[in-house]
Image (tube, rainbow, N blue to C red):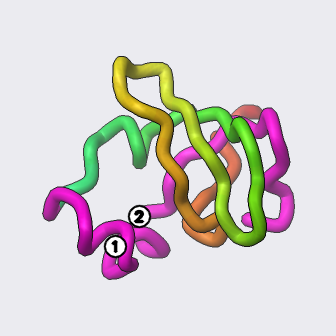
Amino acid sequence: MADAIKKGSLIRVNREAYMGSLEARSSASEPPAYLLEGPGEVLALKGEFAQLRFRQPVPDIWLRSDQLEAYPGS
């Protein structure tokens, strides 16, 4: 589904793709619920990475677009 990701898309992080990744290894052992539940919004795309903003008081983050999936119902 990463092919359908574009600026403005609503997404959530795919657990299987995220766990074991470099990003997951450099973070908490269990990802925060908001990553997996979503929705997050794609703010920008640069190469294989997407800048994401979640509806939480947390900083924007960058993740590989192959770790993302469209938010259900969007």
Q: Which corner quadrant holds the N terminus?
A: bottom right
Q: Which quadrant of the figure has residue 65?
A: bottom right
- Residue 72 visible in the displayed image: no
**Relative depth, front residue between 62 and 24:** 62
Helix, strand or loop at disc 1?
Answer: loop
Q: Which corner quadrant holds the C terminus?
A: top right
Residue that carries the numbered disc 1 in the rendered image:
19
Helix, strand or loop at disc 2?
Answer: helix
Instruction: Check disc 2: other Cα within 10 Å, few if <14, some if 14-19, many if 20+.
Output: some
Where residue 35 sits: x, y (%)? 41, 44
Who's the residue at 48% across and 45% down the image? 61
Q: Which quadrant of the figure has residue 64?
A: bottom right
Where residue 6 sits: x, y (%)? 84, 48
**Amino acid on which the number 2 mark rests in the picture:** Arg
**Relative depth, front residue between 46 and 14:** 46
Who's the residue at 14% across and 63% down the image? 29
Where residue 15 sits: x, y (%)? 41, 64
**Relative depth, front residue between 26 and 20:** 26
Q: Say if 32 sits above or below 28 in the image.
A: above
Q: Answer left or right for 59 relative to 6.
A: left
Mark 2 vs 1: CB contact within 8 A = yes
Q: Say if 2 sits above or below 41 in the image.
A: below
All told, the count of numbered labels is 2
Q: Which mark is residue 15?
A: 2
Q: Let me know if residue 70 is in the magenta part.
A: no
**Amino acid on which the number 1 mark rests in the picture:** Met
- Range of residues picked out in magenta: 1-29
Q: CA distance from mark 2 to mark 1?
A: 6 Å
Q: Which quadrant of the figure has residue 25?
A: bottom left
Instruction: Check disc 1: other Cα within 10 Å, few if <14, some if 14-19, many if 20+.
Output: some
Q: Answer left or right for 48 relative to 32.
A: right
